[in-house]
């Protein structure tokens, strides 16, 4: 996304909005978790979407504070996302950009970003297995499977965003 907003401080440092993004690889994982469903013993269809659908999609913004012509600090945050049976925690992004010009027509840059927080956690359901199993905690998506309820809990999704991102760019003007 193009730079949308820029402000210069009294010390000459410029801070720019680099991008605003809605959704991430974890948002896509939540969407996949919400696909499908299962059928109860009485034939009633139970869709997963009702547990994983969120009215708010995780949104993040990224800022760049330019400290010199060849160095800048990246920083940002995300809002997180919540549904009945899943949560993406808010996160903070920190990083830097270093740029060198080996020749007037070439630019070499290194961008390093780290994300703190932002974990995806799936929560269990409570299911009634009747006289045979009683009421137990179970992975919602596997409640109708052949697995024992306690074993399904080990299959709850607990994912992390990409914690460290490195980007190396070389540009040559012709």
Image (cartoon, rainbow, N blue to C red):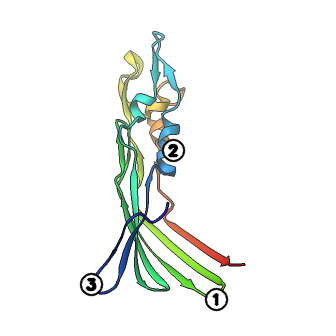
Residue drawn at the location 62% of the way across and 74% of the way down = 169
Q: Which mark is residue 104?
A: 1
Residue 157 vs residue 47, the one in the foreground: 47
Calculate the distance from the C-alpha at mark 3 to the C-alpha at mark 1. 30 Å
At mark 2, the secondary structure is helix
- Indicate which disc, 3 or 2, sits on the residue closer to the N terminus: 3
Whether 21 is drawn above or below 145: the answer is below
- Indicate which disc, 3 or 1, sits on the residue closer to the N terminus: 3
Local crowd at mark 1 within 10 Å, few (<14), some, or many (≥20)? few
Q: Which mark is residue 29?
A: 2
At mark 3, the secondary structure is loop
Residue furthest toward the top? Answer: 42
Local crowd at mark 3 within 10 Å, few (<14), some, or many (≥20)? few
The residue where tag 3 is placed is 10
Whether 94 is drawn above or below 146: the answer is below
Q: Is residue 117 visible?
A: no
């Amino acid at each position: 996304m193009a730079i949308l907003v820029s402000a210069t401080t009294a010390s000459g440092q410029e801070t720019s909005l680099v991008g605003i993004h809605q959704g991430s690889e974890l948002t896509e994982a939540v969407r996949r978790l919400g696909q499908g469903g299962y059928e109860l013993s009485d034939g009633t269809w139970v869709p997963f979407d009702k547990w994983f659908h969120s009215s708010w999609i995780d949104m993040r913004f990224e800022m760049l504070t330019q400290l010199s012509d060849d160095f800048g600090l990246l920083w940002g945050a995300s809002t997180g996302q919540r549904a009945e049976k899943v949560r993406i925690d808010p996160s903070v992004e920190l990083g830097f950009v270093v740029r060198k010009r080996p020749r007037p027509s070439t630019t070499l840059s290194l961008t390093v970003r780290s994300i703190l927080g932002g974990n995806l956690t799936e929560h269990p359901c409570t299911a009634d297995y009747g006289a045979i199993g009683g009421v137990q905690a179970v992975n919602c998506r596997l409640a109708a499977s052949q697995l024992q309820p306690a074993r399904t809990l080990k299959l709850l999704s607990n994912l992390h965003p990409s914690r460290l991102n490195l980007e190396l760019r070389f540009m040559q003007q012709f």
